[in-house]
Amino acid sequence: MVDADRYAYRVHWSGDDAAFIATAAEFPSLSWVEDTPTAALAGMVRLAHEVVSEMEDSGETPPEPVATRDYSGRFVVRIPPETHRDLAIDAAEQGVSLNALALSRLVAA
């Protein structure tokens, strides 16, 4: 049984909608729109609970919450050779490893 309270919820202001929109990373096709961030979040959490319940009732497996998944801390990114060379030069000039340089740029982004 999946605990929908553990999903990765976000609320942001939408100028186009003139409202707050709540989403859950695990359900990219779902959202909830309200006048306040609190109401948007509450609506999205209720919706996620309903969807999880419906999925479980029909024998489907709801998505695992992102926050409870195990991560190795390693991922591979393919980049053009020229970019790889430029990054390697930047790392050497800064006296750090390529991994350390990439991590610092990812965190700063």
Image (tube, helix red, strand yellow):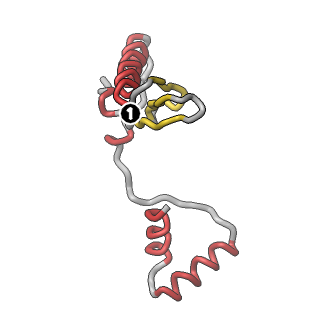
Image quadrant where one finds the N terminus:
top left
Residue 62, image x and y in percent? 41, 25
Tally of numbered discs: 1
The residue lying at 41 percent from left, 37 percent from top is 10
Left or right: 104 in relation to 68: right
Name the amino acid type tagged 1: Glu
Q: Residue at left 38%, top 56%?
A: 72
Is residue 55 shown above or below 70?
A: above
Placement of 27 over or under 90, stated as above or below: above
Neighbourhood count class around disc 1 (C-alpha, 10 Å): few under 14, some 14–19, many 20 upward? some
Tell me where residue 106 appears, x and y as whole percent. 48, 63
| Closer to the camera in the image, 9 or 2 | 9
Of residue 35 and residue 107, the one placed in the foreground of this image is 35
Secondary element under disc 1, as helix, strand or loop, is loop
* Residue drawn at the location 33% of the way across and 26% of the way down: 4
Q: Position of residue 52 (x, y in %)?
A: 39, 20
At a point 69% along the width and 68% down the height, the residue shown is: 80
Q: Quadrant of residue 66?
A: top left
Q: Which residue is mark 1?
A: 64
Along the line of sight, the residue nearer the viewer: 23 or 16: 16
Where's residue 53, x and y in %?
37, 15
